[in-house]
Amino acid sequence: MFNYRNLNILFFFALLALIILSNYYEIGMLSYLILIAFYVSVIAIGTFSIQLNFYFKSLNAAKTNKKEIALTFDDGPHPEITPKVLKLLDEYQIKATFFCICKHVNKHSQIVKNDYEEGNVIGNHSYNHSNLFDLLSSVKMTHELNQTRNTIYHAIGRMSNLFRPPFGVTNPLLKIALHNTNLISIGWSVRSLDTNRSPKSVIARLKRKTRPGTIVLFHDTKEKIIPILKEFIPWLKNNGFSVVSLEELLQIDAYEPL
C-alpha cells in the first residue's frame, strides 16, 4: 500500500541516491526540484483524498455484493432542513447517519435527540468545521473532538465512536488525535456534490455511481436536498438497493457500550 510512511521512505532513498550520484556525475538542481515537486504533489493528493487512506484508515465503503448502501449527512443539524430530512426518511422507513457540528448541536440539541430517537446514527464532525481545522495541533484537534463527543453525549446520552474529517482532509496530526480519542474515521465512496450542483445533476451523478456497499455523502443544510432525496430513494428501491445504517453496512459499533 502506498501511504505516507512509504512515501517518506521512497523520498529518503531517492534523495540519498541523488546525493551519492552527485559524487560521480553532474546532478543538476532540476533533479532535486523534480523529486521535491513529486513529493509535495503526492502529499497534496493524499491529504485531500480521504479514500486513499494515505495517513490512516478511513472506512469509505463496504466490501459486499449485497445491494446495500448507507446515506450520510454532514454539517447539521439545521433548524429547518434537518427536520424535513428526518420526516422524509421516516416516510420511507430508512435510517441514515448524521455527522454533526458541535456548535450546531449546542443550538439545536432537541433536533439531534429526535434524530437519534428515530433510529438514526449521530457522528462527530468537529466543533465548528473551521477551514483552519487541519492546521491545528494534535492537542487542539483532540480537544475539539472530545468537546464534540461530550456535546453529543449530553444531547442523546451516548458517546459516539464515529468521526468524519471536515472537508475529508487528513494529515498526520489528525491521526494522532484519532488515536487519542479512539474515534473511527468515516469517509465516503460517492460525493453527491449536493451543495453546489443542481438537483438534476446530483441525481444523474448518484444513479451513475451508486454500487453495492456505497456510502453517500449528503448535506442536511440546503433545501434542495429534499427533492434530491425524493427522487433518489425511490430509484434505489426500484433498482433493488436497500438503505441500511452505517453500523450494519460496515459491521461497526457507532457508540460506546452503555
Image: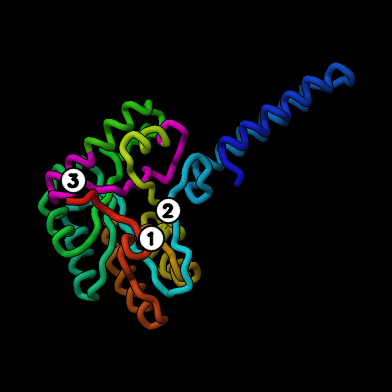
Residue type, numbered disc 2: Leu
Task: Report the residue marked by disc 2.
Answer: 59
Mark sitting earlier along the chain (1/2)? 2
In this view of the protein, which residue sits in the foreground, 106 or 118?
Answer: 118
Task: Report the residue marked by disc 3.
Answer: 152
- What kind of element bears circle 2? loop
**Mark drawn on residue 37:** none
Q: Which residues fall within the magenta stretch? A: 148-174
Q: Does 189 appear in magenta?
A: no
Q: Are marks 3 and 1 in contact (CB under 8 Å)?
A: no
Residue positioned most to the front: 257
Residue 72 lies, with reference to residue 100, above or below; the image says: below
Task: Report the residue marked by disc 1.
Answer: 250
Give how far across and how far down residue 26 sits, in percent.
87, 20
- What kind of element bears circle 1? helix
Residue positioned most to the bottom: 238
Q: Are marks 1 and 2 in contact (CB under 8 Å)?
A: yes
Locate residue 25 relative to residue 196 in the image: left or right: right
Separation of residues labelled 2 and 3 (CA atoms): 21 Å
Give how far across and how far down residue 238 sits, in percent.
38, 83
Task: Classify residue 73 by image quadrant.
Answer: bottom left
Give how far across and how far down residue 108 sits, in percent.
13, 48
Separation of residues labelled 3 and 1 (CA atoms): 22 Å
- Color theme of the render: rainbow
Residue type, numbered disc 3: Ile
The answer to whether residue 17 of the structure is visible from this angle is yes
Mark sitting earlier along the chain (2/3)? 2
- Residue drawn at point x = 31 percent, y = 37 percent: 181
Q: Residues within 10 Å of mark 1 (few under 14, many from 20)?
A: some
